[in-house]
Amino acid sequence: MQFVSKTGQIDKLSTPCLILPVFSKGQQLDVTTRFDQAHNGQITTVLKQGDASGKVGNTLLLQMPAGNKTKRVLLVGLGEQGKTTESDFNNAVQASINAIKHLPIKTICSALLTVEVTDKDIDWKVRQLVLTSREALYQYTETLTTAAPDAHSLEKCQLLAPSGRATQAINEAANIASSIANGVDRAKELANLPGNICTPTYLADTAKTLGKQHTSLKVTVLDEAKMEKLGMGSLLSVSRGSREPAKLITIEHAGGPKSQKPIVIVGKGLTFDAGGISIKPSSGMDEMKYDMCGGASVFGVMQMCAELNLPINVIGVVPSSENLPDGDANKPGDIVTSMAGLTIEILNTDAEGRLILCDALTYSAKFKPDVVIDVATLTGACVVALGKHATGLMANNDELANELLGAGLKAGDKAWQLPLWDEYKPQLKSNFADLANIGGPAGGTITAACFLSRFTEDYKWAHLDIAGTAWKTGAEKGATGRPVHMLSQFILDRC
């Protein structure tokens, strides 16, 4: 859906549907009052009658009299006047789109930018309105036939500019937000595809197609033979149990000068994870197609960079494989040698994400990065620690960690920092190798990061564990597209 700024007198707008804010307490906004006065106090009447409450997310659709330039009005509640929070605003936007997305209309006009949100500016409101609207409109259809939902007819959302606000600034903010939303949708679509379609080869082909679509992107795909020459014994050990060959995908966006050190984002791309010989319980195993959400988010971020032609160098690296049980699969007790030369004792074959990431992190040093950020659905322990709301963050550099935490707060795609202390590292001790691939049940998210830290000592590095935030379970099962927004904000801040 296209988002564009709109100016004009509220009582003279021509639109199939106007979205107007109303409050449960306090005075209504001038924009709502002026429209109400021009239409015989209809809004005042429905508020007094209780047909519309003004409570956050409450909606009421009004059909206007024949001949009126505004055909419909959707009243959406934002709570008490002057106390609208970030959450209130997002809920109101989502409720408004959900209320009208099945109507046979192509264009709507939203006056929600006129609402003051506590501690938030106009750019933030535009960004959230676009992203939340796109979230409400997203629907997966790729593998659906007769059960496919009806396509939404909405094509354009006009954003009514508050008095004194420049329409160009609103359009620029909407353009940035739309590209972030495109990246989020890209990540969702890849993650939601089943494992028999979205294989490592499929991801590699998708990257090549993305490279053809955007001139700023250079795509390189390493096959298993090339990875073997580089000594990636840890990464390659994971794909031994699968008929699908592993791929190492690199997507480079060269928007800045050659002298500028790049941001490197490494995304775990396990297109399906059965756990290997340490096989997972069958219940919920279908959701292990989401073990490549880190890699999917890299695709989304790189698409955003290319669409906006950002003046910065960013490189995405996606090690991709399957993890299945087989006669040639890794066995508990096996020892493999990583690209860094460190030997690893595999005590649990289901701790495979770190095995593919460690070689990708070593490989990333070749780009002489400014910072490296890895993104992975790495540990169930992170879900236990932080639930489904916050991404786990660990880093070997506090300045980088603070940048990411700040970007998450701006984006509403939050992370929480966990310690990366030396006291945890002895849990990875092995009698037979340089380190073990698990550190026991205590502090599992942290010991996983400690494992990765052994391969990132030569540069500034942060680790994002998205096991709790990358997808939803239950009736709303599906990928969330996180942390595309956080990483996009991080990159935009650096621009």
Image: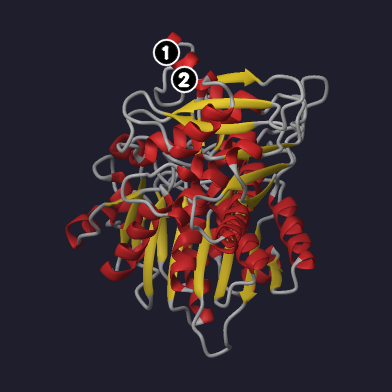
- Which amino acid does the dot numbered 1 rest on? Lys
Distance Cα–Cα, label 1 vs label 2: 6 Å
Give the class, few, some or many, for how many residues have Cα within 10 Å of label 1's Cα (few <14, many ≥20).
Answer: few
What residue appears at the point 63 percent right and 72 percent down from the top-left corner? Answer: 252
Instruction: State whether residue 446 is above or below residue 366.
Output: above
Work out which quarter of the rendered image holds the N terminus and state it: top right
Residue designated by label 1: 48
Residue 13 x/y as whole percent: 66, 39
Tally of marks? 2
In this orientation, does residue 276 appear?
Answer: no
- Farthest bottom residue? 259
Residue 361 x/y as whole percent: 48, 67
Q: Depth check: give the residue in front, 422 or 262.
A: 262
Residue designated by label 2: 44
In this orientation, does residue 462 appear?
Answer: yes
Instruction: State whether residue 202 is above or below residue 74.
Output: below
- What's the mark number on residue 134? none
Q: Are marks 1 and 2 in contact (CB under 8 Å)?
A: yes
Residue 245 x/y as whole percent: 70, 54
- Which amino acid does the dot numbered 2 rest on? Thr
Instruction: State whether residue 217 is above or below residue 133.
Output: below
> In screen coordinates, is 431 left or right of 233?
left
| Secondary structure of the residue carrying numbered label 1 | helix
- Farthest top residue? 49
What residue appears at the point 60 percent right and 66 percent down from the top-left corner? Answer: 305
Q: Depth check: give the residue in front, 201 or 393.
A: 393
Q: Depth check: give the residue in front, 263 or 113.
A: 113
Residue 434 x/y as whole percent: 34, 64
Give the class, few, some or many, for how many residues have Cα within 10 Å of label 2's Cα (few <14, many ≥20).
Answer: some
- Farthest right residue? 146
What residue appears at the point 57 percent right and 77 percent down from the top-left corner? Answer: 311
Q: Depth check: give the residue in front, 129 or 368.
A: 129
